[in-house]
Amino acid sequence: MVVKYIVDESRPFFGKFWPNDVPHQLDIDFSMTMGDLLDRAVKNWGDDPAIWFLDTFVTYKELEDKANRFATYLDSIGVKKGDVVALHLPNCIQYVIAYYGCAKIGAIVTGINPTYKPLEILHQLKLTGAKYILALDALYYNFVKPIESKWEFKKVIWTNLVDEASGMSSVLKLLG
């Protein structure tokens, strides 16, 4: 289903401040998944930067490659369409890669606020039913490890911010 989203041209910001190269109308195809949107972005802007983090740029092609590799890893550990994967990460490249990796296989993402305490994390896991978690190593020992015995994780995956500064090295090492 394609929905036309038309910008209200009577708004003050629309007039002289609206960039010439930005369309006045967007056609939004709600049948597309986030994985489909990433594939389309790769076709349109493959070599352009998709993410900038810690002075590292990741292009759309690189993002898709890493997301596909993470999706393959998730599939190899048994994550199926509809399974919930918790991301206990701050805003970082790894979050984006994991998000799109989950989208590629139809897994549902629940983002866990990195400032949550162990019992708050456990509460969110219970609400969402997440059995898989990707955690930042710096957060894992103080926040996830204390609740491991209280929740039946199928898999705990960890990463850190300086894994090549381009995301998911710990997982990429598993993939070869």
Image (cartoon, rainbow, N blue to C red):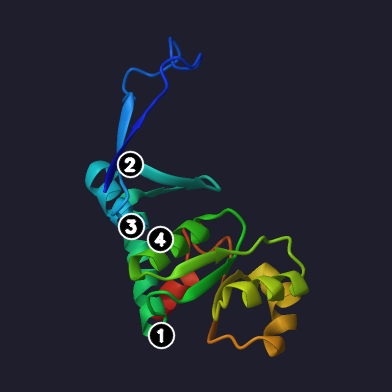
In the rendered structure, are the residues bearing label 1 and label 4 in contact, judged by CB atoms less than 8 Å apart?
A: no
Q: Which residue is mark 4?
A: 100
Q: Which residue is mark 3?
A: 33
Crowding at mark 2 (Cα within 10 Å: few <14, some 14-19, many 20+)? some
Mark 1 against mark 3, which lies toward the viewer?
Answer: 3
Percent from the top left, x then y, of residue 44? Answer: 24, 42
Residue type pointed to by label 1: Gly
Q: Earlier in the sequence, mark 4 or mark 3?
A: 3
Residue 170 vs residue 63, the one in the foreground: 63
* Circle 1: element type: loop
Residue name at image x 43 percent, y 11 percent? 15
The amino acid pointed to by label 3 is Thr
**Upstream in sequence: badge 4 or badge 2:** 2
x and y, in percent, of residue 3 in the image? 30, 40
Q: Nearer the viewer, residue 24 or 157?
A: 24
Tally of numbered tags = 4
In the rendered image, residue 18, in percent from the top left (x then y), is placed at 41, 17
**Mark 4 residue element:** helix
Looking at the image, tell me whether mark 1 or mark 3 is earlier in sequence order: 3
Question: Mark 4 and 3 residues: CB-CB less than 8 Å, in contact?
Answer: no
Disc 3/disc 2 C-alpha distance (Å):
21 Å
